[in-house]
Amino acid sequence: MKKIKFIAMLFIATLVFVSCQNEDTLDKEATSKDQYPEIASKLQKMHFNPSDLKAVDITLPDGTKEEGFQFENDIVMGRDQIMNMQMGGDITTKQYRTWNLVSTPWWGGTRTIKIMGYYASGSNPYYLNYKARVGLVWAVNNYNALRLRIKFKLVWGTSYGSQDILVYNLAGQGGSGGVAGFPSGGNPYKWVRTFGLNGYSYNVNEHVTTHEIGHAVGFRHTDYFNRASCGQNSNEGSAGVGAVHIPGTPWGIDWNSVMLACFNANENGEFGYYDKKALNYMY
């Protein structure tokens, strides 16, 4: 359990995301849903908002890049992942998931997910700083405390490849927040990145990391339908195809959900009651 309580001294801010770019990819700055109509159409059919769709480079800790598409601020997926994703169910309440979940043993056992925090001594810009490491530890504890059919085993290092999820600092970004994607092929999304959070409390670091891991195991934003936590009122759709309703979650905005689209400096980093209910239903 946490022994320290932190007093938020910082201004309230929403997540701001800027994609890594270089001179060879300047054309991506002008990317819009009109330039990628097949991607935008697929996302819209799944009741994602493609209005801020853009092509981005997913920068890995060794400096290499993979091409992807970013939307709804903090979600990044490759073209094949987007085009192959299947969702369904009525959009009727506020906690919801994708059809793309992490597979667990068919006989009802527990699947252990190896999650690595990218850290070693030195000045590598992708290493997690102290606050980010504490935030990751607390985030993993949040999930493991629920005794789900998925269990996280946290390790530290720089040799990646065998782990299921790698959490690292996304160097060179403006703003503060994180970015991740959704499961694919029964596996969690591998790359969970946070950035610009050192000026925030340990609890905010915990909150953002818990949120991005939530995407990696299949959660969508709780307030996707009007993005109220971001000060927006844009409804992305109603019943039909799209988000899968999780039974037992409430009507109206759940302001205690860790999966709200934006965060503020007063976050406590903990799951809300219905976050726990949704996770226990999923896993």
Image: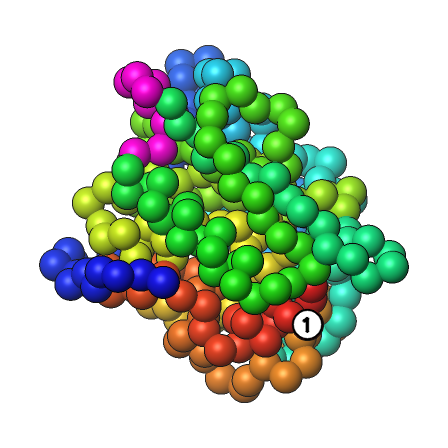
| Protein image colouring | rainbow
Q: Give left or right: position of 58 versus 233.
A: right
Residue linked to disc 1: 281
The amino acid type found where label 1 is placed reads Tyr
Up the image or down, 209 lies above or below 47; here it is above
Where's residue 130, x and y in %? 28, 37
Considering the image in quadrants, where does the N terminus appear?
bottom left
Q: Nearer the viewer, residue 221 or 134?
A: 134
Give the side of residue 147 with respect to residue 260, left or right: right
Corner quadrant of residue 5: bottom left
Q: Position of residue 239 (x, y in %)?
A: 69, 76
Residue at the image position 40 percent from the left and 27 percent from the top: 119
The residue that appears at 36% across and 48% down in the rendered structure is 135
Q: Can residue 250 be seen here?
A: yes
Q: Magenta span covers which residues?
A: 121-129
Query: In the image, 141: left or right of 197?
Result: right
User: For the point 67% across and 47% down, which residue is it?
Assistant: 112
Q: Indicate the position of residue 88 as horizontal and vertical percent values.
A: 76, 65
In the depicted structure, whether residue 118 falls above or below residue 208: above
- Disc 1 crowd rating (10 Å Cα; few below 14, some 14-19, many 20+) is few
Q: Residue at x 82, y 53 (%)?
A: 105
Q: In the picture, which quadrant includes the C terminus?
A: bottom right
Which of these two is toward me, 94 or 120? 120
Residue in the foreground of this view, choosing between 45 and 244 = 244
Rendered image quadrant of residue 254: bottom left
Judged left or right of residue 270, residue 278 is right
In the rendered image, the vertical position of residue 242 relative to residue 54, given as above or below:
below
Magenta portion: prevailing SS class? loop
Image height of 221 relative to 177, above or below: below
Residue 150, position in %: x, y?
Answer: 66, 55
Q: Quadrant of residue 276?
A: bottom right
Callout 1: SS: helix
